[in-house]
Image: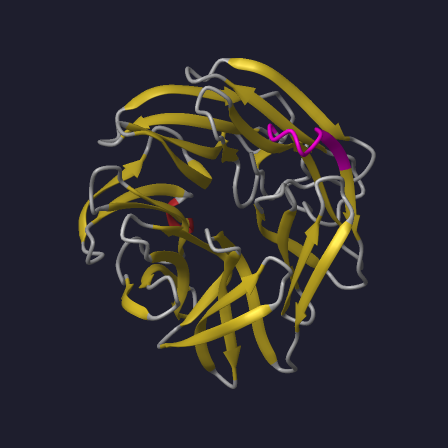
Amino acid sequence: MKRYILIIFYIGILNSNFTQTTFEYLHQDSNDQWPGEMIEDENGNIIFAFLDAQDQSTNLIKISNSGLVLNSYNYFEPNCKSLIKELQPLNDSTFIGLGVYNKDSVFNLWYCRFDLNLNLLFDKKIALDYEVGGERLNSIINDKNNIIVGATYIKEKFITNPCLFELTINGDLLKEKFYTSLNPGLAVFYDLFEIPNSTNYKIFTTGFSQKSLGRIFTVDSAFNILYHNPFNWWESDNHTAKVFNEESYLLGLVRYESKDILCSGLVKHSMNEIVIDSILICEPGIINYTAWFKSIDFIDNSKIYFGSTYDMEFFNPFYSTLPSWFMLNKLDDDLNFIWQKFYGGDACYNLWSILA
């Protein structure tokens, strides 16, 4: 069965060399695929990754700010899982791709450096003791200009836990940490950020064996756990975290109201986990599910974008014959609505990521 990737971009470029453009780009292939990260280059073009479920391969596509395909890149190797999910732009007209490269029961973290024309400049494969999932891998570049990568690894059957890595900007491994007892059972990594004016990090997980109880961990620069907080305010899942200012951050999530009602929520937290503001978008009988990978983004924190899939079929989200919508909300810095818009409704839409 084919899966389609529909990516809608609304791009406003302030530079006078570019005009504001609205477009819709549909990528179609015979294999099942799902989107990874997307970034914008200095000219307003968009580069995005998507992962091939059948071939276990990686594809990159670059499109102009008017929706024209400019370049593409594909890496496929038989009997090999080679997935690039995460993209990090650099200031030297290159970008980094991060993912996993697994072959013959040898597991690797995969670092790739590309130019903006999607030419692979070099890559490095970092051998790992465990298999790491590439689908929900996330990364940041810290204040030392090193890369911090978070992911989930398989310790043994039905037991997963988060892991963290620190790499140089050129892909050399500096340290790694495989956590073993964050939550019993299936503990899954979601997101991370570096705490402002600190060498510490926050990481966000969900433990499926605890009814999707989220946890927020604060770790030091050596990845040792300093303290952690269960996210009990809502039974929540699918976390996206983004620093709001030096004192607070935003956390996007799904709230489980009942078996028939799932709500998308956005919480403003202090760095010591005090709830400052929140919104909850609910409607009886509607599954409103935040974007799978990245539900929050902003450039100016008085213009916050928060996205979800509206009226998703929960038990068949990818191959549903029922219509759904992208819901995009624009909020001010107090989480008040500026506007709310819906896109789609003529097919099965499923939101994975947004980019301001």
Q: Quadrant of residue 78?
A: bottom right
Inspect the magenta stretch and tell me whether residue 19 lies in it. Answer: yes
Q: Quadrant of residue 343?
A: top right
Left or right of 52? Residue 138 is left
Question: Residues in magenta?
Answer: 14-23
Quadrant the C terminus occupies: top right
Inspect the magenta stretch and tell me whether residue 155 lies in it. Answer: no
Residue 220 position within the rendered picture, expressed as x and y whole percent measured from the top left: 19, 51
Vertical side of 98 occupied by 39: above or below: above
What residue is rendered at 61% in x and 20% in y?
Answer: 283
The foreground one among 79 and 296 is 296
What residue is rendered at 70% in x and 28% in y?
Answer: 20
Residue 199 position within the rendered picture, expressed as x and y whole percent measured from the top left: 20, 47
Residue 257 at least partly seen: no
Left or right of 159? Residue 311 is right
What residue is rendered at 61% in x and 31% in y?
Answer: 15
Left or right of 290? Residue 140 is left
Q: Which residue sits furthest left?
A: 226
Vertical side of 230 occupied by 126: above or below: below
Left or right of 301? Residue 347 is right
What residue is rendered at 49% in x and 73% in y?
Answer: 123
Q: Which residue sits furthest front?
A: 17
Residue 31 at least partly seen: yes
* Secondary structure mainly formed by the magenta segment: loop
Residue 294 position within the rendered picture, expressed as x and y whole percent measured from the top left: 52, 41
Residue 119 position within the rendered picture, expressed as x and y whole percent measured from the top left: 62, 67
